[in-house]
Image (spheres, grey):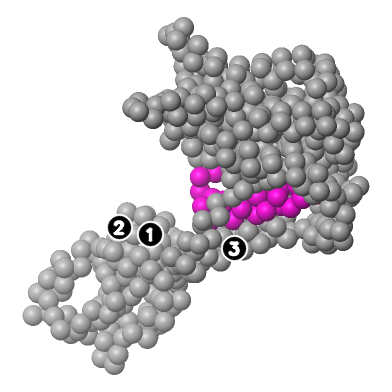
Amino acid sequence: MLPLHPFRPRSLSLLQGYSRQRFIADLGAGFTVGIVALPLAIAFAIASGVKPEQGIFTAIIAGFLISALGGSSVQIGGPAGAFIVVIYGIVQRYGLANLLIASMLAGCLLTVMGALRLGAWVRYIPVSIVIGFTNGIAVLIGLSQLKDFLGLPIAHMPADFFSQIHLIAQHLGQINPMALLVGSACVAIVSLWPKTYAMERGAQAWRARLRHSMALLPGTVIALIAATLACYGLDLPLETIGSRFGGIPQALPSFAWPSFSWTGVKQLLMPTLTLTLLGAIESLLCARVADKLSEQPRHDPNQELMAQGIANLLTPLFGGIPATGTIARTVTNVRAGASSPVAGMVHALVLLIIVLAAAPLAAHIPLAALAGILLVVAWNMGEWHEFARLRHFSRPYRTILLGTFGLTVIFDLMIAVEAGLVLACLFFIYRMSTLFTVQVLPREGLPPGTRALKLFGSLFFAAVGKVEGLNQALQAGEHTLVLDMHMLISMDSSGLDALLQLQRSLQKQGQTLLLCGLNEQPASLIQRGGLAEALGPQGIHGDFTQWLVSAKAASL
């Protein structure tokens, strides 16, 4: 039976010996992250094409479950910027009900992946693919926010890249100057607001204390409050959450089972796989970032996938959208002093209290402010410096990164990842085939009538062409071909078949094939594949040098 990964949430082990000091630190960190998560949850939901409360409910439910059941000490889960483009496309194509079903199906797949110990497999995705689709998603997020940032009177934004550009270009003459001003002010506040929590000593310590105090309230919250007060107090002509969505309900989310049909599920295969793959990649990348920043034990990738799966399975039952690990909130959590998953659970409770106490105030938040915040999120999300560094890397790396980036922007994330993986495999196969070489050993010192070759690397399906013509290596008067294989590290069935064909060709010509210095894996395959039997007891020798000595002695 396939061994399953035990369900062991990190919270159970980290809470052993939990002290009052750690709880106070986690309480402060959770409060800070909860304040940071509020505007992001609202902005991500609106950008994804769903109601703002769905983003908040996702941050509350999924955020609590991921922290309580996950395999990371300090990771924060919730709605993520990476999901915006995917969710928006699913809602536009399949509808909200099918988004919830796809999220639940993805949750099931993530749970199974974790239980089957597939967490480490996500790390096999090349970094060029990850950078490519991350930058592509950042471009699409930024493009999707231009409508509200510029205050354009567009009722419905399409999901297609070129259609969005065409529609925005058609309405550029209808820019709302006040929306542009408010959005730009929010971009400036979020970008320039102090983000350090470090304290310093010396003559300029007051500046460090001031930055520390200001950083306790993040720039996103300051921008949101300032824009909301300006919009409400000055009665600015701006579209708000209240004017578009009617506000945010001041109540707990209600349980509702989405309508389910097998016909609909069959259409959701690609959306489900996209949500599953993106959720796994984002959560485990975020957990690795948390490991580098925190002094806590390394994360358990399989437990993290199971927690992500459970969260995505249960959250849609309360109207929530897909969730995963979020790097920005996790970094904030670590820098605020979190030491255990308690901070993540506190962050979810803080959001719940805000919804129950102050939800009606959110109706006055201008959408231009949320667009400005998301533009900064999109900029910080992209690794733009990687484009400048491309000239230092190989052509395959550049091709994969730029190809994945272009396909993500123009077509679809899943198509981009699939094409990137195919390209990565093809380039890897080609590179490995070039590493396999056949070296002709000098005739001097060999017994009469003998020709010797040395094989290097891995003999697999892409390299067998270099072996297929070796039956022509023997010249007139030579009757024995010796292959020194002690530098051959591996061989597949295609390589074995090539050697079998070589042995048969030489046998038909009245010549002999000898193998020397076989390593463990090629030797095992040769025994199981019948080549050892075809060569006979004298056809395989342990060491080329020893064979050479014995062959010279026999020829004297």
> Residue placed at 70% from the left, 57% from the top?
409
- Where are the magenta residues, as a range? 122-147
Task: Tell us which disc is closer to us: 2 or 3.
Answer: 3
- Toward the bottom, the furthest residue is 476
- Residue marked by disc 3: 402
Do residues under tags 1 and 2 come within 8 Å of each other at their CB atoms? yes
Q: Earlier in the sequence, mark 2 or mark 3?
A: 3
Going by the numbered disc 2, the residue's amino acid type is: Asn
Where is the C terminus found, in terms of image quarters?
bottom left
Tell me which corner region of the image, top left, top right, bottom left or bottom right, holds residue 332: top right
Which mark, by number, is residue 16?
Answer: none
Going by the numbered disc 1, the residue's amino acid type is: Ser
181 falls in the magenta region = no
Q: Secondary structure at mark 3?
A: helix
Q: Position of residue 15 (x, y in %)?
A: 48, 12
Q: Earlier in the sequence, mark 1 or mark 3?
A: 3
Q: Secondary structure at mark 1?
A: strand
The reply, left or right, for residue 472 in relation to residue 35 is: left
Secondary structure that dominates the magenta span: helix
C-alpha span from label 1 to label 2:
8 Å
Which mark, by number, is residue 490?
Answer: 1
